[in-house]
Image (tube, helix red, strand yellow):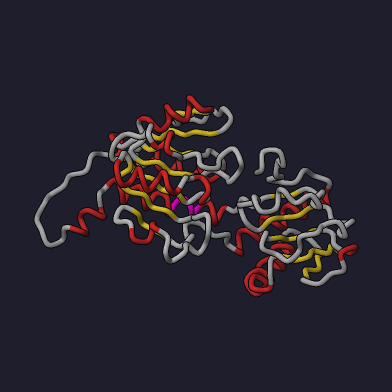
Amino acid sequence: MIKALFAAGPDRWDTYASPLKAAFEGAGLEADLRQDFAPEEVDYIIYAPHSDLQDFRPYTRCKAVLNLWAGVEKITGNATLTQPLCRMVDPGLTQSMVEWVTGHVLRYHLEIDRSVALQDRWLPYVPPLAEERPVTILGLGELGQACATALTRLGFPVSGWSRTAKDLPGLSCHHGTNGLRDALASAQIVVLLLPDTPQTANILDSNSLGWLPQGARIINPGRGPLIDDAALLTALDIGPVDHATLDVFRVEPLPEDHPYWAHPRVTVTPHIAAETRPLTASRVIAENIRRGEAGEAFLYVVDRDRGY
């Protein structure tokens, strides 16, 4: 009998217990899922970084820690974690991110905010076609590639930037510092989907924001620390950024006195772009446990040096 410890907080238990048990059964696993095993009995830990479990040393039998969320920045630096750590790549989360990003890109492209604000006046506006609206996506992992595919299908010319070189069909790919400048230079809309690592912190700062064309829009459903907040506020006030839609922040919930709330060129959304979906995420967890028991390689193992 496989013993799987659910260490994602009691508030998540009611949401995940049934889908996980059903996924284990569907994968042919005989597994006991609980919140209170003795550490030395545990085979797998199903985890969320806000969990009270922070010392992994007693879990001597544990074969892997399976993260329920895509973000792993709060656990990768834990020196007691010596077991393989697997991040969550949830097809449900990916689909919701694609829908959210596509919706806000189209909102900017079609100037929907302007149309709503001018409802009492007849001022016709004909937007360009999608092929005339370049979009740049910073981050070409699972989420970035999925969003890029959706946007290219709508006709947008999409450029992508990643820390390492990539070659993806239908996409103009850039990497490195010079590549970042090239990717931003023509971007009328920028979407941030990078992980939070020391190398990506403040990737949009006073310097890189200055590479954008006048009137550029920014969409950040990735991680709050990707943007230097003070630099963005300045770029919104004096250019070149026309508007920013932000779903993630350095401190969440966003403090009531934060300048973003009152800024007329900022749209704040409460970290809703993408959420792990219990049904589909449970199947990912079950598949990784099946792999572990079969001696196969785990899916989505985190590279500790890269931080994701």
Which quarter shows the C terminus? top right
Residue 223 as seen in the image, left or right of residue 26: left
Q: Is residue 28 left or right of residue 267?
A: right
For the stretch drawn in magenta, the main secondary structure is helix
Q: Whole-percent x and y of residue 97?
A: 48, 52
Q: Quadrant of residue 128?
A: top left
- Vertical side of 92 occupied by 145: above or below: above
Q: Nearer the viewer, residue 258 or 69?
A: 258
* Closer-to-camera residue (200/71): 200
Q: Quadrant of the N terminus?
A: bottom right
Image side of residue 238 versus residue 191, left or right: left
Identify which residue, 91 or 179, lies in the foreground.
179
Q: Residue 303, percent across and down?
A: 71, 40
Q: Is residue 291 magenta?
A: no
> Which residue extends farthest left?
122
Q: Residue at x 36, y 56 (%)?
A: 267
Residue at the image position 82 percent from the left and 48 percent from the top: 82
Residue positioned 45% across, 39% down in the render: 205
Q: Residue at x 73, y 58 (%)?
A: 27
Q: Position of residue 110 (x, y in %)?
A: 26, 48
Q: Is residue 98 above or below residue 6?
A: above
Q: Looking at the picture, does residue 167 appear above or below residue 280?
A: above
Point out the stretch of residues depicted in magenta.
95-99
Front in this rendered view, residue 226 or 284: 226
Q: Is residue 129 left or right of residue 161?
A: left
Horizontal and vertical percent position of residue 93: 54, 55
